[in-house]
Structure formats: C-alpha cells, structure tokens
Amino acid sequence: MSHVQSIKCTNCAAPLKLLGGGRVESITCSYCKSVLDLNNDYKVLSNFKNIKEQYKLPFDIGMKGKLKGIEYIIIGRVTYKETLSVEHGWSDFLLFSPLYGYAWLTYEEGHLIYSKRNRTFPSLSWDEISHQHSVDVERKDYQPYDNYTAKITYVEGELTWIAKYGDKIEYIDLISPPFGMTVENSGTEIEFYDDEYMNANEVYEAFLVPKERREKNDGFHPLKPFEQPLLKVLSKVSLWFMVIIGLLMIAFIFDGHGKNLTHFNVDNRSSVTEPFTLSTTKYLTSIDIKADSAKALNNFNLKLFKDGKLLFSLTQKSAYIFDTKTNKVSKRLETWEKRAKEVVVYLNLEKLGVYQLSVLPIDSAISSSLTITVKEKSSRLNYLLLFMFLLLFLFLLYYFFLWRYNHKLSSEKEINKGDGIFENINNWGQVILWIVVAFSIIFFGKD
Amino acid sequence: MDIYFKWTKLVQCSFCASSIFLNDKEAELIGKASVLSPEPSLIKLHEPIIIDNKKYLPLGKIRYSYGRGFWEEWFLKGESNKEFWLSVDEGDFVLEKRTEISLPFKSPRVVRVGRRYGAYIATEIGEGKCVGFEGELPFSINIGKTYNYIHLSKGGGNLVTVEFTDGIDKIFQGKWIDPLTIKRVYS
C-alpha cells in the first residue's frame, strides 16, 4: 500500500508518476524507456529505447476501469513472444487496486484474459503438473493444455519485479473454459494464476477504450468458451419437437396400420378387376403391389375406377391422377424404379363406396405374377419422418459445432495429447456424426 | 475506553493516541504513538466481517513497513472469544491463528525459499518493521522493532507463518482468503 508519488527519471529527468503500490519494484520511463530500480534509488537497470513496440494495443498505462467489481488502474505492460513460435505473442497489462492488490489483463489477438494470483493450487512440483490428467483446484477440474517458454520483448510502466529484455519464463497452461490456470516458472519462483476469459466488449467499455482501437476476437483461444446460443436453443426446441413427433408417429403407427379391404393375386395370363368397398376416408388408402422380380412388377398396368370412371393409372413408365369432370390428367406422379420388386401407392380417396381395381398384364408372354393388398385407414409416415430428420439435423447441428470446437481444442493441445475429456468428446462427436450419416443413407436410400 | 477482548494487553486511546498497557492489576501509560496514516482498507475497526460463514470482529491492527510499502496484521475476535489474525497485504489476505505445531527444521535461519521442509515448501522469507498500531492487542509490541517471518505453504491455500527474531517467537497457521469472499455484517 502506498500513495501516488511523482519522481523524476534518473536518466532523462522526465516526470514519472508512481501509481502502483508498495510491491512495485521497477518503472520504465515512458520517454527514454529506461528501467529504474525503485528499491535502489531509481538506478537505471536497462533500456528499451531501441526496442520497437511490436503491437499497437487498445490499452494505455493510466487507464482506469472496473473488472469483476474491482476498480483497477493499468500500471504496467509486458509483451512476450513464444521462443519456439515467434509469431505468437501477447501482452500482459498489470492492474492495481489499493484494496484488492494486483491482477493481470492479458491481450492476445483481440482475446482478453483476466488473471489473479492463486494460492490454493495443490502441492505439485513442476514436472508433476505436466503429467496430471487433470488438476482439481477449488472444485474446478483443469486439464493441462500447453507447456512453453516465452521471452520478454517489451516493457512499459511499473512492474512488481525487474523485467529485462529477453528474460525467459516457462509456462504450463491448464484449462477449464472459460477458466484456466497459468503456472509460471521464472527460474527463481513458481507462481500460480487463476485465469478467466473475458467478454472483450465489456472490458473495452469498462476501460473506455475508443472504438477504433478495439479488435475483434473471432479466432480460436483455448479459454474462449464454446458459445452458440441460437443453435443451443434450436437444439433444445428440436429435441422437444422430436419427442412430440415421435409420440405422434407411434400413435399413427398403431391407429393407422390399415384395415384390409382386398387381397388377390394376378398373373400374366389374364387381367383381373377386383372391387373393394371404402368405408372410411380417415388417413389414406394404400395399394401394396408385390412381385417376385422387378421384371414381373414392370409387366403390369394398374387402373382404379369408381362408378366406371378412371381415377388413377399406374405403370412403370407413367403414373397419373385423372379428373373425370374435365376428362384430363389432373396430376402426374413419379413412378417406381425399374429395379423395384414392390411398390406401395397411397391414395387420398375422398368418396366412400365401391371401387374397381383393374390389373392388366402388358406382355402376356412374360411369366409374371403379382400379389396386391388394398387397405383403408393407412397412415403414411414419410413426411413425418422427413420432418423428424430435419429436427434431428437441427438438434445435432449444435453438437456438431461443439464437437468441432473440442476437436480444435484437442488438436491444439500440447500436453497429454490424445488423453482426457477432449478426446472422449471427440469420439462421441464422431459417433454422433456417423449415426446421422447412417440414418440419412438408410432413409433417403430407401425411397 | 471500551475493551472488547478479555485478554487484551495493549490498547490505544482513540482520542489522544496514548498507548496503555493492561497488566493483571492496573493500566499503565507506556507512551504516545503516532496515528497511522489512513489507507483504503476492506477491514475497519469494530465493523464485524464474515469469512467462510464465520463472524469476526476487528479489534486492532499492527502496521509493518517493508521499505516502499507496508502490510497490516489485523487482530480479530472470532466466535467463542478466540484470537485470530488477518494479514492484509495489497490484496493478499491470510486468516491465521496461533498454534504450537512442531516445525520440520530446528532453526529458521537455515530455511531457504523454494525448498521443501517436510509437508511444507518455504514460499517467502521477509522482514517488516513495526510502525504502529491501532485499537487493542492481546500482547505488547515494540514500535520500531524489525520482525522476521517465513511463509510455509502446504498447498491448497494452507499456510504456516513463523515469526522469529533470534529464535522462533510465534507460529501461526491458516489459509489464504479471497478478498472477494469477505462480507461485512452491516454493509
């Protein structure tokens, strides 16, 4: 704890304000970039003058804002680059609150992480942490995710230690999105930090960051939680509809399984006209035509009459509904495939009474026979099934994106690769996808 | 002057800042301490707080300086009239009580930061100069005296603090506290 003080840079005499409390050990002059030792009469320790500031960032030292209910002031900044991947860098902003002490706000390609020192980490050595499948800290399960070394490339403002250009720090990241733990090994001390992925816009608003300096965070970050609220709602709604449609389908299967009106056989030697009496118009009237071979099925012409007038005609080559009032074909229908051995026709017959079903062989020389069954009160579930698949698709869409997110998380993971919850989720995602593909093939292939 | 704790030994008059030592028979004026500079703090004298569903009453505090800054040790009266200490250092809060545990080393001088001693890892060794106090304390203090301490961490937020000068003076055992979990009884 300390009061705000003003000092003069011992290198360039520029006025510097000390904002950050009693634990601050160094300040970098904002004018000449000299690093001054606060515990040793502001002695110049090093200089960042020739180090180019790599990133233009949304935050400046001195900005004030409220995070997690705590009033903070930004007092310092350290920029790091990973030693094995120099393109990968980030900046840590040191926050200070006189009541709650120090915290960090990490900025990484638009992503913002709030970190605070953790004191409750289990008593594990550095090597032990990497080899854990998960680490339980205050009832949160963290997965070891990455182990890397970074070096300091830029420093600004006040810090609670003396940072020099090129200083190396080793990290272990553990994740439980949107939370995480960072274990830092500076060589002399191991520190633990609680991390939390922040809503960038809320942080920008809190620190009054001008809109033109705000960067979007569309990319991947291991702590960025999976969020698809619209798809999640759609998935839940789809599930409920699937339950309702499923129950309806069961009801239709029981109630609309059909009542036999006639059942007869026909062969290539003569034509047959079979009458049947329709007693209800509930659901549809089905005509099931079965043959031993596709050639036999294709050798017949089927016509349906009512009171001597043609209503419907069906051969392998054409199918249509005939309008007796206009004496014209009112609707052409798709016929069956050449290789089919069975066809079921569903007709919406509006009038009750006697109908004649006429079956004629096309070529009496081809040995063929048919078995025909006519049923009334037959329900047709194709449209409901189609709707069911649409709902299933919407239901699984959310889980597909969740699987894709976990797949990405798993592929980026550098510790215990192939282990843990990510892989399990991955496997389940694949199982779900294969189920959908299999169902789709069965359903669409059948028609 | 109101005394809130049965075993209070040192009390500061809130009007004239006189320090009064309470022995078994009488109150003895031992001097006048300078008033501590007011600093923003989550804890206020005589304003009860709740930590982990337990109520504590802050009765006094000792301020220690470590050069550029300082930390404060708050003397709390817990439930059943027990003595607790809350260390407050720029957002780091540790709630401890005195203990008589045996330590896995003979002399605190041999302890080094980062080394393991039995179930403990030494995480911090430091010193602080006592610069003053407020309220009442269960023992007398020497203003201006430098106190040494060792922090021994047991993991999971468990901490042992060893206070020493030449030999071991006092041992405290407790836990790190998240300041956001500290609630005021009368907010």
Image (cartoon, rainbow, N blue to C red):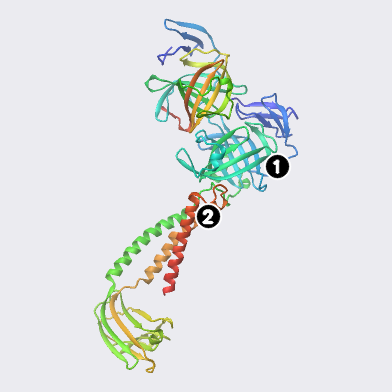
* Side of A56 where B111 appears, left or right: left
Query: Where does the image place residue A151, in percent across and percent down from the top left?
Result: 66, 40
Quarter the N terminus of chain B occupies: top left
- Vertical arrangement, residue A441 with respect to residue A216, above or below: below
Q: Which residue is mark 1?
A: A53
Q: Which mark is residue A168?
A: none
Mark 2 belongs to chain: A
Looking at the picture, does residue A217 appear above or below residue A49?
below
On the same chain, marks 2 and 1? The answer is: yes
Please state, as top left, top right, bottom left or bottom right, where the C terminus of chain B lies in the image.
Answer: top left
Q: Quadrant of residue A253?
A: bottom left
Rendered location of residue A326, percent (x, y): 37, 87
Circle 1 crowding by C-alpha within 10 Å: few under 14, some 14–19, many from 20:
some
Residue B172 visible in image: yes
- Judging from the image, mark 1 belongs to the subunit labelled A
Give the secondary structure at mark 2: helix
Q: Nearer the viewer, mark 2 or mark 1?
A: 2
Q: Amino acid at mark 1?
A: Glu
Q: Which residue is mark 2?
A: A407
Instruction: Give how far apart the Cα atoms at labels 2 and 1 are.
Output: 35 Å
Q: Quick check: can you spot residue A324? A: no
Q: Identify which residue is drawn at 39% across, 58% down.
A: A239
Give the residue displayed 26% in from the left and 87% down from the top: A275
Left or right of residue A106: residue A330: left
Report the number of discs: 2
Characterize the local packing of mark 2: few (<14), some (14-19) or many (20 or more) Cα atoms within 10 angstroms.
some
Amino acid type, callout 2: His
